[in-house]
Image (cartoon, rainbow, N blue to C red):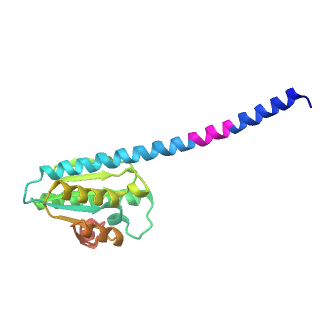
Amino acid sequence: MTSNDIFRDTRVAHVRELKAEVAKLKEELAHERVERESLDSHFALALAAVRDAERMPPDAELLVVDGWNAVIGTHRLDADACRAGRDRLVEALRARVTEEPRLHVWAVFDGADMNAASEADGRLRVGYTGGSGAHRADRMVCDYLRARKILGIKHPVTVVTDDKDFAKEAATLGAAVKGTDTLHAKTQAD
């Protein structure tokens, strides 16, 4: 083995190390990109909710619904059943807003939108967090509850969820909390 062979082998080993490092960095960059997109979605929806709250009349009430918790609960449903349940929930909430003139509703769904877009329809906002883990609906609603305290927004807020940890935190932040059974009579399939 000559000195040129040693140098060549050293360079080849170094190139392999660099390629492995580049692959690792690409993976980290992809993860960071997904995280940034999740945060973008989280903050855009939270800011829209705060803007909605600032425009609400003084006698308005806000009902915040933990969307997938209300649709799925503890059941295992396929994607079609989830979409159908979500659609029934949104239609029931739309009808409720029509029936109760002081009521504003915000239905927040975790993660991807399952072929539906975030929407604002008068006093009904349906939003999808687009995130996972720490950027899910629970955190977004709690961030909203903190923001309304800081901004001095006084309208009453009721959070509908069966998630005990989320319910406890929402109550600590000043929201009334109700279980999803208050919605089920209006959202179940006939």
Tell me residue 132's x, y (percent): 43, 54
What kind of secondary structure does the magenta stretch mostly adopt? helix
The residue that appears at 71% across and 33% down in the rendered structure is: 15
Residue interval drawn in magenta:
18-26
Residue 44 at what x, y percent from top left?
A: 29, 45
Q: Reply yes or no: does residue 20 show up in magenta.
A: yes
The part of the image, by quadrant, that contains residue 16 is top right
Q: Please state, as top left, top right, bottom left or bottom right, where the N terminus lies in the image.
A: top right
In the image, what residue occupies the spot 27% across and 62% down? 65
Q: Residue at 34% x, 59% y: name it.
A: 139
Vertical relation: 22 (above or below) 141: above
Question: Which residue extends farthest right?
Answer: 1
Is residue 71 something one can see in this rendering? Answer: yes
| Image quadrant in which you'd find residue 61 | bottom left
Closer to the camera, 162 or 26?
26
For the residue pair 64 and 36, the one nearer the viewer reads as 36
Residue 172 lies in the magenta stretch: no
Q: Position of residue 6 (x, y in %)?
A: 85, 32
Image quarter of the C terminus: bottom left
* Whether residue 87 is visible: no
Residue under the image location 20 percent in, 53 percent down:
124
